[in-house]
Amino acid sequence: MSIEIVLGLPRFPPPVHPTCMTPLMPIIAGTLSPEAPAALAAAFAHRGKSIYLVGGIVRDWLLGRPSADYDFTTDALPEETKRILTKVSDNVYQPGEKYGTISATVEGHVLQVTTFRGEQYAAGSRRPEVRYGVSLEEDLARRDFTMNALALRLDPIAPPDPSDLDRLRDAVIDHFEGRRDLQERIVRAVGEPTAR
């Protein structure tokens, strides 16, 4: 492994995605410009699709923490998502396509866009069958904890602004009381833990 020294600190080659051996892009400090989520929302809206920021970034923003963990979910199928992302990025790739995830680099940040998913268990099985095209609520129900089952719909006119906490709180989609759990500092599983 080669190591490069930048500003006196060792810089390692980017890690490799474990399932496909594709180099992962290093995360750039800072956040996307407001124009980037607006362009992303407009590209999906132009095709009649919606797109939401989900998970850790929404949680972190509600806590007033910076985050560059750009995970999105959409009602667009993976092939459609690829076509849409080419309108906002020259670097679209699919390390997790079999799971419905298409990635793109925008302004040096890796964006991961995953098609809405739901789960169905066969009798006696602990392995779910994952399917596409379900609702946002069903997609969020698959998440581990209520604080990670939060979403923000991207709007081409008014993209989310992490510095405006009041507007952010009003815009958050929270089907599982994740905001309350964050406020009360409770880590709680989505749904019935024994059923998971």
Image (cartoon, helix red, strand yellow):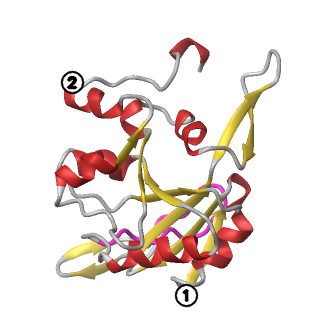
Q: Is residue 15 magenta?
A: yes
Mark 1–mark 2 distance (CA, rounded to whole Å)? 42 Å
Q: Quadrant of residue 174?
A: top left
Q: Quadrant of the C terminus?
A: top right
Q: Measured along the vertical axis of the image, is residue 89 above or below residue 100?
A: below
Mark 2, secondary structure of its residue: helix
Percent position (x, y) of residue 95?
A: 64, 64
Residue 116 screen position, x and y as percent? 63, 50
Asked whether, in this view, residue 10 is left or right of residue 50, the answer is left
The quarter of the picture where residue 7 lies is bottom left
x 62%, y 74%: residue: 93
Would you say 21 lies left or right of 184 here?
A: right
Q: Position of residue 8 (x, y in %)?
A: 17, 78
Magenta range is 14-28
Give the prevailing secondary structure in the magenta stretch. Answer: loop
Residue at mark 1? 90
At label 2, which amino acid type do we have?
Answer: Glu
The residue that disc 2 covers is 184
Q: Which sits in the foreground, 194 or 39?
A: 39
Q: Is residue 186 left or right of residue 84?
A: left
SS type, badge 1: loop
